[in-house]
């Protein structure tokens, strides 16, 4: 039998650091800002790619007791993390064939149409168990949730449709709360309240991360922040009130000098306008570093802004370090692609996308380090 040596830290080309204290602090910031009763947490997609197995216990320790995921299989992954307290709600609702999983494991579905409501009501009566469920009222997203006609039908038939199960609450999803001054947020809230007044009383949830920082009137019985927990800016028009959570460092693979007019990378999409020093960094689109960052990304080295040059490839990016002062970079040095000075939102802006995509795209080749500072 051949025994292979373990791969040590020196053999890995990039390190992703997740600051657990910053996650805890961000939850505290949100609970302090939110005047409602319950602050939940959206931890779908493996806590936005950062590791639900590590992060959920941190949030639980801070007092979070309501966790939202997208799919039923994500709920199952949280079971061992929530022993001794904590409920799980599934945003995609209960699909046909999944009903027993929900009711037997005490998982809360978010019911998105009348057919789901009717099936859940019948199931609870069959089990003689008033299991809880949220009801999603669609006020403008037009994606999931009860349509205006569905709501009207629910109002007419709620005595039969809502019989047999516990109403965990009514919720909706703001469309553009991250856009300061967009009137649609107020319009959605007013419609949500209009519908709520026609239905049996139950806790109400309107706020996502951004809505928490808008009108305090939106602070109802519960909220479900997600992106802000990981350091994303919920108020893009202002300074970020959240702490930075993620740091990404990657190794320099090679440094070389090229003459003026020499191209760099696939497609020769960038040519040096002068004699230049180019560093190749060990991260690429296989690591979730989006190809859209080609010729538009940037990072900071020794306080100096350094541009990406050429296309992002599968395993590498190239940067122009000609103007970086001081001791030159060399093979094996680490540079920071994500930190407090180059945030997830900054990288997203350069890629023409949103920070959510950057976080959830981060790959699994990184050495992951969970820190307390």
Image: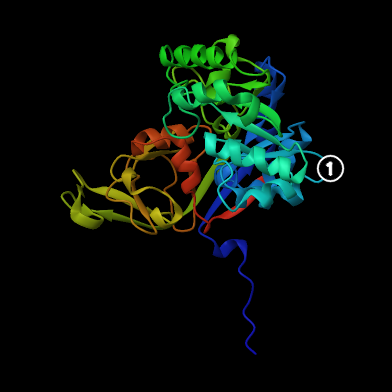
Q: Position of residue 215 (x, y in %)?
A: 55, 10
Q: Position of residue 42 (x, y in %)?
A: 60, 36
In the rendered image, the vertical position of residue 226 relative to residue 359, given as above or below: above
In the rendered image, the vertical position of residue 357 relative to residue 37, given as above or below: below
Colour treatment of the image: rainbow
Label total for image: 1
Which quadrant of the figure has residue 84? top right
Q: Judge left or right: residue 261 versus residue 190.
A: left
Label 1 crowd bin: few (<14), some (14–19), many (20+), radius 10 Å: few
Residue 245 visible from this viewpoint:
no
State the residue position of label 1: 84
Q: Position of residue 163 (x, y in %)?
A: 68, 30
Which residue occupies the extreme right position in the image? Answer: 84
- Residue at x 59% of width, y 36% of height: 117
Nearer to us in this view, 82 or 56: 82
The image quadrant where one finds the N terminus is: bottom right
- Residue at x 41% of width, y 37% of height: 347
Which quadrant of the figure has residue 11? bottom right
Q: Judge left or right: residue 352 versus residue 57.
A: left
- Residue at x 45% of width, y 27% of height: 147
Nearer to us in this view, 361 or 5: 361
Q: Position of residue 221 (x, y in %)?
A: 68, 19
Which residue occupies the extreme bottom position in the image? Answer: 1
Element at label 1:
loop
Residue 158 visible from this viewpoint:
yes
The image quadrant where one finds the C terminus is: top right
In the rendered image, the vertical position of residue 72 relative to residue 89, given as above or below: below
């Amino acid at each position: 039998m051949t025994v292979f040596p373990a791969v040590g830290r020196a053999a890995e080309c990039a390190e992703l650091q997740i600051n657990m204290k910053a996650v805890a602090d961000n939850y505290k910031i949100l609970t302090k800002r939110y005047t409602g009763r319950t602050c939940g947490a959206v931890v779908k997609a493996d806590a936005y790619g950062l590791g639900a197995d590590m992060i959920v216990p941190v949030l639980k320790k801070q007092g979070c007791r309501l966790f939202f995921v997208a799919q039923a299989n994500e709920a199952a992954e949280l079971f061992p993390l929530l022993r001794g307290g904590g409920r799980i709600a599934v945003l995609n609702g209960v699909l046909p064939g999944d009903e027993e999983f929900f009711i037997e494991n005490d998982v809360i579905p978010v019911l998105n149409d009348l057919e789901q409501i009717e099936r859940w009501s019948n199931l609870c009566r069959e089990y003689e168990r008033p299991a809880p469920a949220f009801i999603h009222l669609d006020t403008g997203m037009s994606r999931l949730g009860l349509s205006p006609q569905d709501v009207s039908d629910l109002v007419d038939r709620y005595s039969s449709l809502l019989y047999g199960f516990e109403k965990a609450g009514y919720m909706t999803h703001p469309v553009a709360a991250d856009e300061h001054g967009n009137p649609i947020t107020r319009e959605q809230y007013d419609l949500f309240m209009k519908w709520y007044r026609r239905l049996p009383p139950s806790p109400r949830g309107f706020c996502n991360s951004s809505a928490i920082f808008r009108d305090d009137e939106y602070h109802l019985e519960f909220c479900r922040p997600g992106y802000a927990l990981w350091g994303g800016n919920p108020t893009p028009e202002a300074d970020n009130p959240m702490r930075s959570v993620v740091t990404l460092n990657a190794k320099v693979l090679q440094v070389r000098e090229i003459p003026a007019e020499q191209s760099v990378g696939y497609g020769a999409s960038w040519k040096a306008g002068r004699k230049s020093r180019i560093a190749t960094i060990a991260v690429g689109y296989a690591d979730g570093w989006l190809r859209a960052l080609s010729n538009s990304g940037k990072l900071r080295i020794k306080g100096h802004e350094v541009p990406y040059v050429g296309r992002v490839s599968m395993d590498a990016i190239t940067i122009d370090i000609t103007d970086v002062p001081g001791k030159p970079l060399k093979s094996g040095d680490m540079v920071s692609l994500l930190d407090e000075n180059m945030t997830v939102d900054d990288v997203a802006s350069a890629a023409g996308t949103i920070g959510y995509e950057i976080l959830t795209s981060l790959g699994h080749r990184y050495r992951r380090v969970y820190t307390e500072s």
